[in-house]
Image (cartoon, rainbow, N blue to C red):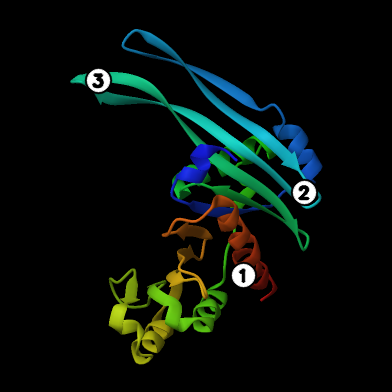
Amino acid sequence: MDEGLEAMPLAAKIFEIRAEASLEEIAEKLNGYKMIEEREEDGEKFELLTEIRDLDLKEDRLEGVFSRDKLIVVNQRGKQVPIIKTTDARIIFRRVEGLTLLTVVQEKHFANAVASLLSHHLFLSYRAITEARISPDVMREFHERNPEGTKVIYFDDLDFVDVDKLALYGDSLKGTSLYEEYLRHGKIYYLVYQVPGTGYVMGLTRNCVITAFTRMPCDEFIGYIDGVIVPLILKSRKG
């Protein structure tokens, strides 16, 4: 695995592939993908590379690395110097119960950009890859399975006037009356919680953004997503 991916703070977002395509077809279309953009800054020419590399196709999953260059300007001993910054994202396509999911291991804005580019490249449509979703009922059930581990709950879709979001944290989580009241007026959107039996603290949103607030190996993070978060998506679809 790329050292940069292991060193970075871990975040991921899960998407759903709406178009019909096998993992073999996706692998074929992504194999050798490379795009070069020429830029000029202060008279100096740069080649910015976007590519997909290290594709690995298995029976029910396709993994690889999406890599994109960006031109940034840094302060170097009092001078503004343009340099190329490369951002990598691990991408995982997975077939599960007739559904194809895409996990992008990067912060949500970069993950959204990756999903948009892949949607257009693979299917010539920006609507072919959409956000995966966890239903409010499944989010509630997930919290109530481990209430003592929850550290923060955010509620949205509130019917209070001029209130978009509310949060419970700290001592407020110990009582149930305020929690039940907020549920009557809104839906759970975001949870911060400790994974049972571990020291890991995670964040999870209804639109499937997962954040590890404590350091953990990338493979373990992906394994947690596969084993815990993906079943929540599947359960939401069945409900």
Quadrant where the C terminus sits is bottom right
3D distance between C-alphas at marks 1 and 2: 22 Å
User: Answer yes or no: do the residues labelled 1 and 3 have beta carbons within 8 Å?
Assistant: no
Question: Which one is in front in this view, the residue at disc 1 or the one at disc 2?
Answer: 1
Amino acid type indicated by mark 3: Gln
Quadrant housing residue 36: top right
Q: Please tell me which residue is depicted at 58% across the width and 43% down the height of the picture.
A: 90
Q: Position of residue 120 (x, y in %)?
A: 63, 37
Residue closest to the far left: 78
Q: Secondary structure at mark 1?
A: helix
Q: Position of residue 210 (x, y in %)?
A: 50, 59
Residue closest to the far top: 43
Quadrant housing residue 119: top right
> Which label number is shown at residue 232?
1
The reply to whether residue 113 is visible in this rendering is no
Identify residue for label 3: 80
3D distance between C-alphas at marks 1 and 3: 47 Å
Q: Is residue 65 above or below residue 156?
A: above
| Dot 2 crowding, Cα within 10 Å, few <14, some 14–19, many 20+ | few
Q: Please tell me which residue is depicted at 30% across the width and 78% down the height of the picture.
A: 170
Q: Secondary structure at mark 3?
A: strand
Front-most of residues 111 and 57? 57
Amino acid type indicated by mark 1: Leu
Q: Please tell me which residue is depicted at 57% across the width and 48% down the height of the picture.
A: 104
Question: Which one is in front in this view, the residue at disc 1 or the one at disc 3?
Answer: 3
